[in-house]
């Protein structure tokens, strides 16, 4: 067997492809270095913008793998390896995974949007998807709330990010909407003064914005007053319940009637 013949052939192939091999190695080395730099810069930008640490790591790893695959494909194509089929296989695999995890990907995208734009944060009281509670934890796929009854509510981030969200904490102050009804024979001015005194004496009612009291409706059996005190978000329910109780007691003390249905027994 003519070993020299085969050796010469191998040397000839190496000689012809030497530049391509060197180019591929350079692409691989420089490309991986640049990919590492890009990921590092991206993480710094996300940290500067206050993106959640969990999301920073996840997106950083995702970007790192995407760039490494791109560098690898570019390098092997330099030495003459056909990459079209390889790319097609990757695309098909990605599509299959995407279809299989469609719901999870929607929740992931929703979680990413929530963490980037921050419509609420841990500790906020929010209302969303027909639920209300304190935000306990924001994860990449779900958000957890504690309800007023101390029940754990788990909301998928996909639906959460695409629906209406009411944040009761963000502005720091909430208006408490209450209604008191008194009889038509009662003095409107006196009623307003009695109820206003209740608001001014309540330590949890804010002075600024100032509370307001106005006639809101002339109902069938009562004149209704819209009582609007303001409170901090953490004192909302304290103000709501205390003003209701103190308002009733103050109206009773002033002799102002709060009408209610009466049953009259007719004697035969």
Image (cartoon, grey):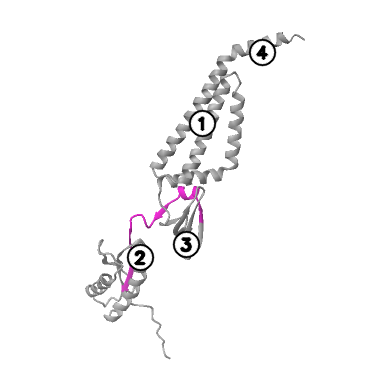
The residue carrying mark 4 is 10
Dot 4: element: helix
Residue nearer the viewer, 123 or 16:
16
> Magenta segment: does it hold 187?
no
Instruction: Look at discs 2 and 1 and give the one toward the viewer.
Output: 1
How packed mark 1 is, by other alpha carbons closer than 10 Å (few <14, some 14-19, many 20 or more), is: some
Residues marked 4 and 3 touching at CB (< 8 Å): no
Image height check: is 1 above or below 206?
Answer: above
Instruction: Look at discs 1 and 3 and give the one toward the viewer.
Output: 1
Q: Which span of residues is magenta-colored? A: 154-181
The residue carrying mark 1 is 67
Q: CA distance from mark 2 to mark 1?
A: 51 Å
How packed mark 3 is, by other alpha carbons closer than 10 Å (few <14, some 14-19, many 20 or more), is: some
Q: CA distance from mark 1 to mark 3?
A: 43 Å
The residue carrying mark 3 is 147
Q: Quadrant of residue 266?
A: bottom left
Q: CA distance from mark 2 to mark 3?
A: 16 Å
């Amino acid at each position: 067997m003519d070993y020299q013949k085969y050796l010469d052939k191998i040397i000839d192939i190496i000689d012809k492809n030497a530049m391509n091999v060197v180019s591929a190695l350079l692409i691989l080395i420089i490309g991986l270095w640049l990919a590492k730099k890009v990921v590092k810069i991206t993480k710094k930008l996300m940290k500067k913008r206050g993106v959640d640490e969990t999301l920073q790591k996840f997106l950083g790893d995702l970007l790192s793998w995407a760039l490494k695959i791109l560098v690898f494909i570019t390098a092997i194509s330099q030495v003459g390896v056909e990459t079209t089929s390889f790319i097609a296989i990757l695309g098909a695999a990605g599509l299959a995974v995407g279809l299989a995890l469609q719901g999870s990907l929607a929740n992931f995208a929703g979680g990413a949007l929530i963490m980037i734009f921050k419509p609420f944060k841990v500790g906020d009281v929010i209302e969303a998807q027909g639920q209300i509670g304190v935000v306990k934890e924001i994860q990449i796929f779900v958000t957890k709330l504690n309800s007023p009854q101390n029940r754990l509510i788990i909301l998928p981030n996909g639906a959460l990010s695409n629906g209406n969200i009411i944040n009761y904490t963000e502005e720091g102050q909430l208006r408490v909407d209450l209604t008191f009804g008194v009889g038509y024979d009662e003095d409107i001015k006196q009623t307003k003064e009695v109820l206003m005194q209740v608001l001014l004496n309540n330590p949890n009612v804010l002075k600024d914005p100032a509370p307001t009291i106005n006639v809101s409706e002339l109902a069938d059996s009562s004149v209704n007053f819209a009582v609007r005190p303001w409170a901090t978000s953490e004192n909302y329910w304290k103000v709501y319940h205390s003003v209701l109780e103190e308002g009733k007691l103050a109206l009773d003390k002033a002799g102002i009637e709060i009408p209610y249905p009466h049953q009259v027994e007719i004697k035969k």
